[in-house]
Amino acid sequence: KQEVTQIPAALSVPEGENLVLNCSFTDSAIYNLQWFRQDPGKGLTSLLLIQSSQREQTSGRLNASLDKSSGRSTLYIAASQPGDSATYLCAVYTSYDKVIFGPGTSLSVIP
Amino acid sequence: DVKVTQSSRYLVKRTGEKVFLECVQDMDHENMFWYRQDPGLGLRLIYFSYDVKMKEKGDIPEGYSVSREKKERFSLILESASTNQTSMYLCASSLSTFVGGRHYGYTFGSGTRLTVV
C-alpha cells in the first residue's frame, strides 16, 4: 500500500533563505506527483505537477524534482518571502485519477 | 484557468439537519471528488464521480451521499448532520484523459468550513 510522508511537519525560516521541502513515498510505481499550497482556511492551490516522464518542473522561484527510484520528491523555494507562509502538500498519483496526499509541511517565513 | 466553485465558504448547521454542499466546475472535467480535511487526519476521500449519474464510494462514505445530475455540478449531501461531521470540505475535479500528452492533475475549490452544532 502506497504511503506518503512529508518531513519536516513544520519549518520556520527567516526571509530570504532558500529552503527544501521533502516528500517521500513507499512505492516507486507512481504516475505523477503534484505539489499544492494551502493557506489557512482555504482550498488547495496547485503549484507544480511533474509528469511521469519528467524529473523536474520549475515555476518562478519554485523547483520540484522527482526521483521515482528512490521514492522522493523535493520542492525547492528560492529567496523565501513572508507570503510563502502556508502548508505545502504533495500528492502522489497511483493512476491518472487516484491520488494519495501527504500530511503537509507547515512553512512560516519570518520577516 | 479551470475554476472549481464551492457555493459556501462557511456554514453553520444544527444536528439532524439535511445539508447540501455544492460544487461547480467550468472546464468540462469528467471526474469530480469530495474530500474532508481534519487536523491530524489529512485529506480523506468521501465520494467521487467519473461521469454524470455515476458515483463511487471513497474511504469514508458513511453519513454522506452525493448527486451528479449534470457534468459540471457535484453535490455532497449530509443526510442528518452530526457534530462529528464538523470539518473542512474540499471539492476537486480533473480530466479523465491526457491533453497533448500531459496529465493535468486535480483542481480544487476554495473549501467549505462546515460547523454542526
Image: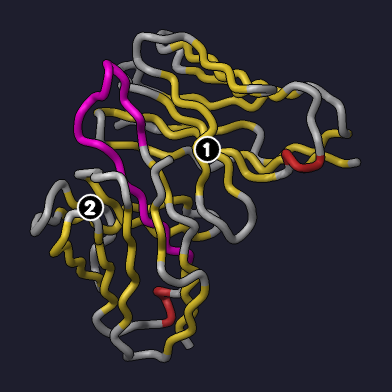
- Mark 2 closeness class: few <14, some 14–19, many ≥20 residues within 10 Å: many
Residue range corresponding to the magenta coloring: B88-105
Residue B40 x %, y %: 54, 54
User: Mark 1 vs mark 2: same chain?
Assistant: no
* Quadrant of the rendered image containing residue A9: top right
Q: Image height check: is A53 above or below B16?
A: above
Q: CA distance from mark 1 to mark 2?
A: 20 Å
Instruction: Name the residue at the right extreme.
Output: A111
Where's the N terminus of chain B, which quadrant?
top left
* Residue that mark 2 sits on: B48
Amino acid on which disc 2 is placed = Phe
Q: Is residue B105 left or right of residue A96?
A: right
Residue occupying the point 74% across, 37% down = A11
Whether A31 is drawn above or below B1: the answer is above
The residue that appears at 52% across and 20% down in the rendered structure is A73
| Disc 1 + disc 2, Cβ < 8 Å | no
- Residue at 38%, 90% (x, y): give it: B15
Which quarter of the picture shows residue B73? bottom left
- B22 w.r.t. B108: above or below: below
> Predominant secondary structure in magenta?
loop
Identify the secondary structure beneath mark 1.
strand
Q: Which residue is mark 1?
A: A36
